[in-house]
Amino acid sequence: MLEALSSAAGSAHGGTDLFNLAERRMNWLESRESTLAGNVANANTPGYVPKDSAPFQGVLQNQMTMMLAQTEPGHMAGHVEPTRTDRSNSSTSPDKNEVTLEDELEKIASTNDDQLFATTVYTRYMSMFSTALGTSS
C-alpha cells in the first residue's frame, strides 16, 4: 500500500514525490551521522582530518533540476548558488589532527534534530493520507 501511495503522490499533478524525498533525506542523515561518528571515533588519531557529507541541498540539485519561471520578459532567471563549508578556522589538537569534539557533537545534535523533524513530517503526512482514506483511528 505504501508503494501505491508513493506513486500516487508523485504522479498527482506532476508534483514532488514526498515519500521518495523523505526517504532520500533520511538516508542522507543516516550517512552523515555515520560520518560524524567516525570523526568522533578518530578524535585521538594523529593526523586525522574530519569529514562531513555534502549538503543535502547539493543532493537535491544533482537529482532535481528546477529553475524559476520567467513570467515576464524583464524578469531575471533564477538560480541558487551552492553553499560551501569553510574549514579555515579549524584548529589542531595536541594529536595533530583537526577534530574538535565540540564541533562534531554540535553537528551530531543538529543531525538528530533534522531526523526528528523528518520523521515528524512523514508521520503527519501519513496521517493526512489516513484521514483522506477514512482509515484514521
Image (cartoon, rainbow, N blue to C red):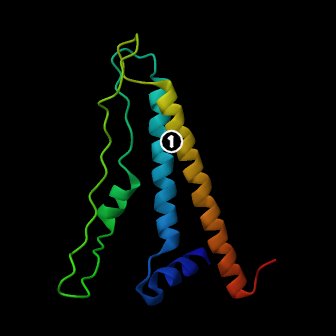
Farthest top residue? 94
| Picture mark count | 1
**Does residue 116 appear to the left or right of 68 in the view shown?**
right
Give the residue displayed 48% in from the left and 58% down from the top.
Answer: 25
The residue that label 1 is drawn on is: 33
Determine the residue located farthest toward the front in the rendered image. Answer: 74
Q: Position of residue 41 (x, y in %)?
A: 49, 25
Report x, y in % for residue 53.
38, 44
> Quick one: SS at disc 1?
helix
Q: Amino acid at mark 1?
A: Glu
Q: Quadrant of residue 98?
A: top left
**Relative to 97, residue 22 above or below:** below
Along the viewing direction, whichever of 82 and 25 lies nearer the viewer: 82
Q: Residue at x 65, y 80 (%)?
A: 129
Q: Quadrant of residue 91?
A: top left
Q: Residues within 10 Å of mark 1 (few under 14, many from 20)?
A: many
Q: Between 71 and 21, which is closer to the camera in this rendering? A: 71
Residue drawn at (55%, 76%) of the image: 3
User: Where residue 56 sits: x, y (%)?
Assistant: 40, 55
- Asked whether, in this view, residue 1 is left or right of residue 52, the answer is right
Quarter placement of the N terminus: bottom right
Q: Residue furthest left?
A: 73
Looking at the picture, how far across and down is residue 48, in whole percent? Answer: 36, 22
Query: To which quarter of the image does residue 117 belong?
Result: bottom right
Q: Can you say which quadrant of the picture contains the C terminus? A: bottom right
Left/right placement of residue 134 relative to residue 102 reads right
